[in-house]
Image (cartoon, rainbow, N blue to C red):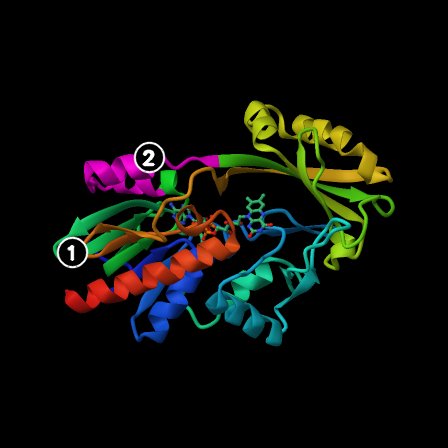
């Protein structure tokens, strides 16, 4: 099959945090890397949207860090002006731990991490095949990419589908381990308000009952010129209403969020996250699926259901790939 571009050492599927961090580490170890993503914008679940003069973070809301390596990356991003501290907690008993946000929005974090990397967007991978001693990756537009090694970072069920499409067999124990990883769903409402919301500063709130699991005031957060709230539904509500009309589900959530809205809703949109956060986290920070040629799977399902977990999984995956590439 003709390849679309020059073969690379490592092809990374996904430009979420895990893929971007792995790519940076591999590239700094002098490996050639190419990232492919099906989306139009970088960052995966780091996502932002504009509605007129209103701006929303509608995926990950903030970033926390306990690992010194990840903390260093966040500090460098802050020095570059692309991340900043949002706050140190949301309730009256704030815990003093920094919540970072992107500057101006969460997608700036992905843009910062992507600097200097080779990336092709709007390339949906449909199959991954072994071709001689390498991998061949096929996209929905009929292009083929060749690589000495591959890193899969989509949510685990999506990665398993790519392996099945390319007839790559997994060891039964590994298959069972990966098939056991499932994800929460999340319906996210973005609403433009006529006036300020009743969410208290610094702009984040976790209701103790009802279908709303999180609310954020994007104006108080410092990212929106106009009053704009993000509302996340819990897994139970999102699953129960997944196949229903999105605007109707959004209306139900706006009703549930009414005590904190405080102003008329001028307009709203709804986004569905099918793979919001993993319900199970694997015991290892990434997994080796094939040794020769190396094939590794990573993402937040391996090192923790948050941005930091995705970053640590990306770091572990790059180390694993480097060690196996040097042996092959
Ligand atoms: C609503 C919501 C709120 C959250 N809140 C927080 C929070 O406040 N703090 C926090 O730390 N974490 C939060 N998280 C979790 C956090 O966003 C994730 O843990 C992290 O971003 C996952 O990164 P990742 O690289 O593992 O995966 P992803 O970001 O999902 O990246 C995977 C990428 O693979 C791409 N892809 C998938 N299939 C294909 C294909 N076939 N071909 C090409 N590309 C493909 C996708 O387009 C995507 O860009 C939240 C998540 C959601 C959805």
Residue that badge 1 annotates: 292
Residues rendered magenta in the picture: 159-183
In the rendered image, residue 69, in percent from the top left (x then y), is placed at: 46, 68
Seen in the image, is 140 located left or right of residue 57? left
| Residue 16 at least partly seen | no
Q: Residue at horizontal 71%, vertical 26%?
A: 252
Q: Residue at horizontal 69%, vertical 31%?
A: 250
Q: Say whether residue 295 is magenta.
A: no
Seen in the image, is 69 located left or right of residue 263? left
Residue that badge 2 annotates: 179
Seen in the image, is 45 located left or right of residue 166? right
- Cβ–Cβ below 8 Å for labels 1 and 2? no
The disc, 1 or 2, on the residue closer to the chain's N-terminal end is 2
Q: Is mark 1 on a helix, strand or loop?
A: loop
* Mark sitting on residue 241: none
Residue closest to the eye, 129 or 209: 209
C-alpha distance separating marks 1 and 2: 23 Å
By secondary structure, the bulk of the magenta-drawn segment is best described as helix
Say few, some or many: other residues with alpha carbon within 10 Å of mark 2 (under 14 / 14 to 19 / 20 or more): few
Q: Quadrant of the C terminus?
A: bottom left
In the rendered image, residue 217, in percent from the top left (x then y), is placed at: 75, 49
In the rendered image, residue 219, in percent from the top left (x then y), is placed at: 78, 54
In the displayed structure, 247 sits above or below 139; it is above
Q: Residue at horizontal 20%, vertical 42%?
A: 168
Cβ of mark 2 under 8 Å from ligand 1: the answer is no
Q: Is mark 2 on a helix, strand or loop?
A: helix
In the rendered image, residue 20, in percent from the top left (x then y), is placed at: 43, 62
Seen in the image, is 165 located left or right of residue 224? left
Residue closest to the eye, 223 or 287: 287
Q: Residue at horizontal 55%, vertical 53%?
A: 46
């Amino acid at each position: 099959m003709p390849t679309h571009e020059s073969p690379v050492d490592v092809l990374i599927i996904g430009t979420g945090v895990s893929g971007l961090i792995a790519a940076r580490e591999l590239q700094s170890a002098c490996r050639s890397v190419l990232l492919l993503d099906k989306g139009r914008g970088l960052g995966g679940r780091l996502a932002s949207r504009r509605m007129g003069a209103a701006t929303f973070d509608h995926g990950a809301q903030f970033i926390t860090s306990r690992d010194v390596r990840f903390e260093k990356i966040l500090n460098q991003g802050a020095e570059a002006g692309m991340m900043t501290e949002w706050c140190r907690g949301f309730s009256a008993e704030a815990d003093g731990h920094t919540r970072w946000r992107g500057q101006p929005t969460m997608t700036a974090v992905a843009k910062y991490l992507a600097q200097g990397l080779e990336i092709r967007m709007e390339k949906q991978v449909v199959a991954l095949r072994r071709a001689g001693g390498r991998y061949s990756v096929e996209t929905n537009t009929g292009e083929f990419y060749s690589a000495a090694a591959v890193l899969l970072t989509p949510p685990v069920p999506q990665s398993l589908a790519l392996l099945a499409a390319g007839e790559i067999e997994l060891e039964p124990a590994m298959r069972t381990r990966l098939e056991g990883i499932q994800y929460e769903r999340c319906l996210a409402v973005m609403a433009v308000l006529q006036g300020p919301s009743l969410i208290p500063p610094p702009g984040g709130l976790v209701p103790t009952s009802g279908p709303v699991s999180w609310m954020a005031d994007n104006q108080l957060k410092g990212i929106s010129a106009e009053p704009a709230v993000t509302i996340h539904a819990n897994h139970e509500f999102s699953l129960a209403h997944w196949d229903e009309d999105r605007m109707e589900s959004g209306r139900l959530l706006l009703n549930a969020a009414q005590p904190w809205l405080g102003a008329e809703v001028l307009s709203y949109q709804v986004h569905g996250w099918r793979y919001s956060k993993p319900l199970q986290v694997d015991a290892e920070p990434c997994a080796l699926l094939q040794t020769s040629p190396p094939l590794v799977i990573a993402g937040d399902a391996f090192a923790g259901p948050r941005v930091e977990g995705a970053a640590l999984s990306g770091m572990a995956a790059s180390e694993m790939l480097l060690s196996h590439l040097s042996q092959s």
